Structure formats: structure tokens, C-alpha cells
Image (cartoon, rainbow, N blue to C red):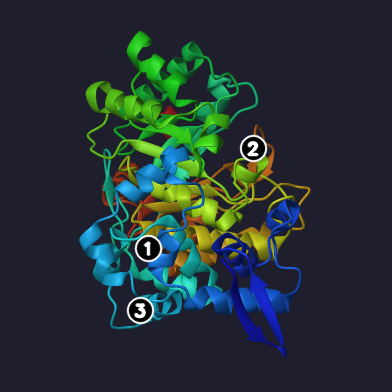
Amino acid sequence: MILKTRLFGRVYEFKSICEVMAKANEEKSGDQLAGIAAETAEERVAAKVVLANLTLDDLRNSPAVPYEEDEVTRIIQDDVNETIFREFKGMTVAEFREWLLDSRTTGNMIRRASRGITAEIIAGVCKLMSNLDLIYAARKIQVTAHCNTTIGLPGTFSSRLQPNHTTDDPKGIIASVMEGFSYGCGDAVLGLNPVDDSVESVARILKMFDEFKNKWEIPTQICVLAHVSTQTAAVERLGAPLDLMFQSIAGSQKGNEAFGLTAAMLEEGRATVLRRGSCTGPNVMYFETGQGSELSSEAHNGWDQVTMEARCYGFAKRYKPFLVNTVVGFIGPEYLYDAKQVTRAGLEDHFMGKLTGIPMGCDACYTNHMKTDQNDIENLAALLVAAGCTYLMSIPEGDDCMLMYQCTGYHEIPTLREIFGLRPIREFDLWLEKMGFSENGRLTDKAGDASVFLSR
């Protein structure tokens, strides 16, 4: 297949939809590393022109990995509502973009359409949007989910309390937990990345979190971000309390295999939480993603990182998650080089997740060898909240001493809520007031005072 257009006095030819999608992508160091990026701005524009004139049917019929070879493709394709797809299949990608941005197109209309499109369609329309387009379209879309509480309701903005510690020391972890909760963080989840991901250690931390949550009657969810098989064993063998089952996922079967993961393992993990977990449900899964993970494991099949990221969300949707977030700047400058690329990727990922129909958050973050700083991440955080982002991370001082990366801190969450007139999840909001940490949605002088938790 030769796809071509005349632009700037010359003819541009592309050998496949795969090449068009890669070269229509905004500049990303990961695509350059893979050797698939547009060589010039003019070539990028030409690819966008060709992409704009493809139909949604064209993109559906060009999955990044063939159906017969990849379980991620099969899950995405098999979950399409064919009746809805037939309504949209003749649209060009440009027409679909205009429909999404039309002020007469409501969030409910978009949510219905999301049931009839594939990840490649979502990635394709994303490539034709400006940053403001991504913010405006994503803000229209409301996605809610319920574990112990309901996330994503209008007027709310949530956070994950991430009390990571270099040695998994219980006292150090709980110190961070107390401080984070006192600032109004953690209504999405109290979730730790363990240093020791053995079954015994994961079970110990889960029990510690569960005891703390129950003692103080905190309406939230708990999670330890170990491999799904480890968490399953902690529940089945040691009786560990578990509200959310975590797993990092990729946009191809080969990428998931690099994580030691199969779709069957996710099904088993989800079934375990629904059968033996400590939560209300029915949404009991927590997934993390990030542009470039498939390239890092040589599992991208020649496709660009935005398309592969969109496939993560199509895969995640099958398991009805409570939380999904892109750890947008964590992999490093080989995949997203600087603040401009990280900002673009964060807005892309959030939009694509919401258009897929999942409750989408973001770990707005960077590593210290990137051309990015804390001001850039705060800019991205503000843009994401403007776009209706469900939740962000909250880490002591925005500095994860265990994972060695920079992120949003305990202070940023209440600040963003105040700027945008938002509140935590309602039950958590009421708990903050009961504890004296907030009043009428504003933090009190007790915020940051962990000694409140030592009173009994």
C-alpha cells in the first residue's frame, strides 16, 4: 500500500499505515530511537494530512500487531461494539476529530462512541490534535469507577498516596502515610512500591496498611504494587487484605511477556480480589503504563509509542479497572527527551485513556537526567487537572527516595484542588473534616501535623 500527498511543492509517499502513524506523531525521542519518526517537520505535516484522510475503518483494519499473533489485539478487537462501529467506520480521522471537538458533542455521546472504536483509531485522532484540543476533549468525558469509594465524579480530584521507603521500614512508611493523609492525599489509593516484593513482605505491608486504614476509619483503597502473581499468592496463601490488584501492562503480548504477564494471569488476579479481597468492588484493578515501554522491550512491532500506549488502555478496559495511570516521564529521555515531549505525552495519554473509557490518572514525573524540572511537572499537573484528570501522585516533597525520580508532592494536591475549585472523593472529604485536617474544602492548621495520628 502506497499512501501519498502533495505538499510544499513535492510528493510525500508512505509505504503503510504504520509508517503514516509513526511519522504523524509529534516529535518523540523514542520514535527517533526506533528509526520510525518523521525526518522533518514538513514530512510530519504530510503524514498528518494522509492520516486525516484515512477512515476509521482503515485504522481498525490495521492493528499494530496481527490478530492471530497477539492477545492484546484480540482483546481490543473482540470488545468492539459492532453496531456502534458501523455508525463511525466511514468517518475520516479528521471528521472524527471535528466530531469530538464539536460543542454539540456531549461526554455521554463520546462515552457511547468509545465502545465502538479501537486503540489505533484513538491514537490516530490523538495525533491530529493540539494540546488544547486534548484538554478540551478529555474534559468532556466523565469516567467513574467504584472500589471502596467512587472515583471520577464531577467536582472531585483525587491522589494516590505513595509512601515509598528505601528499606520498606514500617516506621518510615507510616510516617509518610500519616503526613500524606494529613494533607488530604490518598483518596484514590494508599499504594506503595515495595523494595522487597516477596510474598511475605507484600502481605506484611498490606496488613499494616489495612490496620492503619481501619483504626482511623479512612475511606480509601490499599495496594502494594508488586507483580500480580505475588499479590495473588499473598491473598491466597497468607490471607493478606487487598483492595486493589496492581500490574504494569504493555500494548502488545510480547511487551506483557517482558513483564512476566499474560491475560490469563490478570483474569486470575481479578477473580481472586473479587472472591477474597477486602474491598467492595466491582472495580478492583490498578494498572500503570508509560510511553516507550514496548520499545524498551523490543515489543513495539515497528509502531510508534503513542499507538502502543493507546493499546495499553484498550487492554486495560477489559478488566474494568478502578485506576489507570501513565507514569509519563519515568522511563527517561531515550523515550521522552524534555519538558515539551513529557507535557505532550501526558496530555495524549490522559485523552486516550478517557476516550477509551477508563478512569485515567497520571504520574506527572521525570528523572534527573531529563531536560525537565519541577516547574515543568507542575505545569503538566495543572494542565491535566484542567483536562479533568481523575488523579495524580502524592509523594513526600515530590521526591521518591526509593524509585529515584521526581513527582508531584503532598502540597501540590490541595493547591490544585483550591485553584480549580475541586474536592476529594466525598467520603474522604468528610473524613478530613472529622479529623480536623480541612474545613469547607480548605486545609486547616492541622495539615501536615502527623501527631494527630498519635493521639490514641
Which badge, 2 or 1, is on the more N-terminal residue? Answer: 2
> How much space separates mark 1 and mark 3, taking CA atoms?
28 Å
Measuring 42% from the left and 59% from the top, which residue is drawn there?
61
**Is residue 310 visible to the viewer in this orientation of the structure?**
yes
Crowdedness of circle 1 by 10 Å Cα count: few (<14), some, many (20+)?
some
Measuring 65% from the left and 45% from the top, which residue is drawn there?
295
**Is residue 444 visible to the viewer in this orientation of the structure?**
no
Mark nearer the viewer, 1 or 3:
3
Q: Is residue 247 left or right of residue 40?
A: left
Q: Is residue 48 left or right of residue 430?
A: right
Q: Position of residue 234 (x, y in %)?
A: 40, 15
User: Mark 2 is on which residue type?
Assistant: Ser
Q: Position of residue 180 (x, y in %)?
A: 49, 41
> Do labels 2 and 1 touch, CB within 8 Å?
no
> How much space separates mark 3 and mark 2, taking CA atoms?
36 Å
Q: Is residue 37 left or right of residue 391?
A: right
Which badge, 1 or 3, is on the more N-terminal residue? Answer: 3
Dot label at residue 297: 2
Q: Which residue is mark 1?
A: 422
Q: What is the secondary structure assignment of the residue under circle 3?
A: helix
Dot label at residue 19: none
User: Mark 1 is on which residue type?
Assistant: Leu
Residue 283, by quadrant, is top left
Mark nearer the viewer, 2 or 1:
2
Q: Which residue is mark 3?
A: 99
On-image quarter of the N terminus: bottom right
